[in-house]
Amino acid sequence: MSRDHGILPIHDHYTCMIDLLSRAGRIKEAQDFIHKMPFPPDAVGWATLLSSCRVHSNLEVGKWAAESLLDLEPTNPAGYILLSSIYAAKGKWNTVAQLRRGMREKGLRKDPGCSWIKFKNKLYIFSADDFSSPYYDQIYAELEKLNEKMIQMGYVPDASSVLHDVEELEKIKMLGHHSERLAIAFGLIFIPRHCPIRIVKNLRVCRDCHNATKYISKITQREILVRDAVRFHLFKDGACSCGDFW
C-alpha cells in the first residue's frame, strides 16, 4: 500500500490483517504482526483477536488480548465474557468465578439472552428455558423431535458453550433450551415452508447453537436467518454463510 500506491495504512487496515490471520488460526502470526505495528490495535482489533482465540482455544494469547481490550474499554463486559468462555472450555472454573466476581465488583453484567421472531405482525420473544409462551408444549415437543434426528445425523452437543460448573447432562439440557432454539422451533411450527425463518438475538450465538442450527436447516430443508449481536447468519442445507467464524 505504501510503496506501490502511496496509501498510509490506518487502524482499519491493520485490524483487517489481524482478522485475516487470526480467523485462519494463525494466532502466533497475528500476535507477531501486532508487535510490529506502528501503533497498538484499537478495541475492535483486540476484540477480533480475542474472538479468534475463543474459536481456536488459545488461552495464552486470549488472555493477552482480553487484558489489552479491558485496558481500553474497562466497562465493556465483552472482554470478560469471551475470556470466561476460553477458561470454561479448559475447565478452569475457579478462574471463571474470579472473572465473574471482577465483573460484579465493577458493576458490569451480561445482558440476559433473548431471541425474537415475528409472525402475523406480532413479536414473540423467548428467553432460555422459557415456558411463558402459550405454545410451549408444541415448541418443546418440536425441539425433542429435532434433537433425536440431529443425534442420528452425528450431532454432538458442545458443552464448552455453557459457562457454569454443573454436571455434563445438565449442561446439555441447558444448551437445548437456549432462546434461539425456542424461537426457531416456533418458526418451524408456524412460519409457512416457502418462507425463511428470521430470528434476532441480542447476544452472540453460542458455538453449540450455531452448530445445532446447521443441522436443523439440513433436517428441515428450511432457510434460517439469525441476526445476533455480531453479524447475520444464513443457515441453509447444513451450512452457514459466516463460514463458522463470528
Image (tube, grey):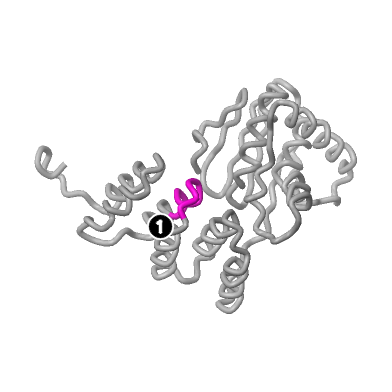
Secondary-structure class at tag 1: helix
Which of 134 and 105 lies nearest the eye of the viewer? Answer: 105
Total numbered badges shown on the rendered structure? 1
Q: Which residue is drawn at 56% across and 31% down?
A: 240
| Residue 132, image x, y percentages | 85, 51
Identify whether 237 is placed above or below 151.
above
| Residue 56, image x, y percentages | 48, 46
Q: Residue at x 80, y 37 (%)?
A: 143
Magenta stretch encompasses residue 55: yes
The answer to whether residue 127 of the structure is visible from this angle is no
Image position of 229 (left or right of 141): left
Q: Is the magenta stretch mostly helix, strand or loop?
A: helix
Identify whether 20 is placed above or below 90.
above
Identify whether 101 is placed above or below 9.
below
Question: Which quadrant of the structure image shows residue 183?
Answer: top right
Q: Name the residue under label 1.
A: 61
Q: Give the range drawn in magenta.
A: 50-58
Question: Which quadrant of the structure image shows residue 189?
Answer: top right
Q: Residue at x 87, y 41 (%)?
A: 135
Which of 98 and 184 lies nearest the eye of the viewer? Answer: 98
Q: Which residue is drawn at 54% across and 56% down?
A: 86
| Residue 43, image x, y percentages | 39, 60
| Residue 26, image x, y percentages | 36, 44
Image position of 120 (left or right of 78): right
Q: Where does the N terminus fall, quadrant-wise?
A: top left
Crowding near the residue tagged with mark 1, few <14, some 14–19, many ≥20 C-alpha atoms within 10 Å: some
Give the amino acid type for the residue marked by disc 1 in the picture. Answer: Val
Magenta stretch encompasses residue 152: no
The answer to whether residue 135 of the structure is visible from this angle is yes
Which of 101 and 192 lies nearest the eye of the viewer? Answer: 101
